[in-house]
Image (tube, helix red, strand yellow):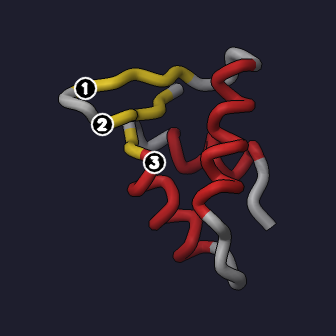
Amino acid sequence: MVDANMITGVLSDGKLSTKEITDIISQKSPLPVPTSIIEGLLNQLVANGKIKKTEENGETYYHL
């Protein structure tokens, strides 16, 4: 199961793209996690002010 704590833990390594976050979580999770679920959690964390979202060269990145 993926949750907000898992995502913020992944972001402790620095600025990551959605694909990088999805790849890391998929490696850690025993079951496949749909990208839409991860994107929903990322958007919720941004809305709550827990993480930041930036765009560079057309790519979206998330960081603490």
Q: Earlier in the sequence, mark 1 or mark 3?
A: 3
Residue beneath the point at 39% across and 34% down = 61
Residue 6 image point, x, y percent: 69, 52
Residue 44: numbered disc: none
| Residue 17, position as x, y percentages in the image | 38, 44
The mark that comes first in sequence, 3 or 2, is 3
Residue beneath disc 2: 59
Which residue is most to the left? Answer: 57
Q: Nearer the viewer, residue 53 or 36?
A: 36
Residue 13 higher or lower than 56, as above or below = below
Along the line of sight, which residue is nearer the eye, 19 or 29? 19
Q: Amino acid at mark 1?
A: Glu
Marks 1 and 2 close (CB-CB < 8 Å): yes
In front of the other: 41 or 25? 41
Real-space Cα separation, disc 1 to disc 3, in angstroms:
13 Å
Circle 3 residue: 18
Label 1 to label 2: alpha-carbon separation: 5 Å
Across and down, in percent, residue 53 comes to: 48, 24
Amino acid type indicated by mark 3: Thr
Residue 44: give x, y in percent of width and height: 74, 31
Which residue lies under the disc numbered 1? 56
In the image, what residue type sits under mark 2?
Glu
Judged left or right of residue 41, residue 59 is: left
